[in-house]
Image (cartoon, rainbow, N blue to C red):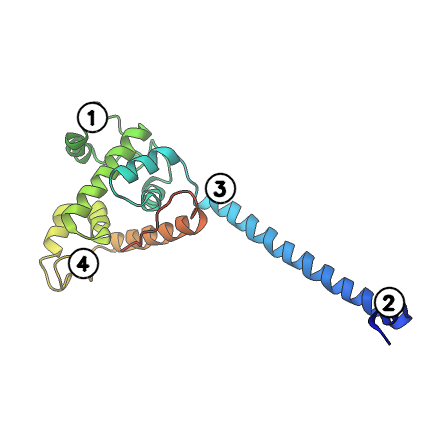
Amino acid sequence: MGIRNFFNGERGRRALKIITKICLSIIIATWGVIGVTYAVRSIQRNHFYPIKYKEIVIENAVNNGLDPYLVFAVIKVESGFNNKAVSNRGAIGLMQLTPTTASYMAGFTGDSVLDLTDASLNIKLGCKYISYLMMRFKSTKTALVAYNAGEGNVAVWLTKKEYSKDGINLDNIPFNETREYIKRIEKSFSKYKNLYGNIVDKDKNFE
């Protein structure tokens, strides 16, 4: 019996119906998975890992040799993209800069009016500060520890063998708050690269 004759028979028609149902089930299941994946991705983008001030971040990140995703991660962790955020230590704005640090960075950028609630200025000075710390400490991770714990503390820690074996990388971070800070930055950095991998032509590792 040929294939055509088989499907013209009763058994063939039943088999064809079963095959059709299986194919439809697979298609529906596939689209369901795609739909759920898209929905989860959309929720993560809109509610947990948003991107705001995109053009400003990318411009200043590129100008300072930084990965834009790292800058988004810092802003996410520091202020949750609240340009009016003020910490109990007096840090202000999106990237939580103190007036003292901002003034020092402004000496490099040439800015004179330091309204740290201004998103453009805050991101500009914040990116300059991260770049400055990376040049000083030769490690992205160490620079970010300094961003949170202070340059002076990190400079001392790097001289002590219990904290740093090579004087560049920190094997142990004394402050619990800073250890958690670095974990949050790493997680956010990874999430931003995964969720927005197509927004910029960069592919740098956290280290």
Across and down, in percent, residue 24 comes to: 73, 59
Local crowd at mark 3 within 10 Å, few (<14), some, or many (≥20)?
few
Q: Is residue 184 above or below residue 61?
A: below
Q: Nearer the viewer, residue 89 or 1?
A: 1
Left or right of 34, for residue 12: right
C-alpha distance separating marks 3 and 1: 33 Å
Q: Residues within 10 Å of mark 2 (few under 14, many from 20)?
A: few
Residue 169: which numbered mark, if any? 4
Q: Secondary structure at mark 3?
A: helix
Q: Which residue is mark 1?
A: 111
Residue 53 visible at all: no
Q: Is residue 204 visible?
A: yes
Left or right: 137, with 71 as reference point: left
Q: Earlier in the sequence, mark 4 or mark 2?
A: 2
Q: Residue 122: percent from the left, percent from the top? A: 28, 32
Alpha carbon separation for disc pair 2 and 3: 49 Å
Identify residue for label 3.
Answer: 46
Q: Are marks 2 and 1 in contact (CB under 8 Å)?
A: no
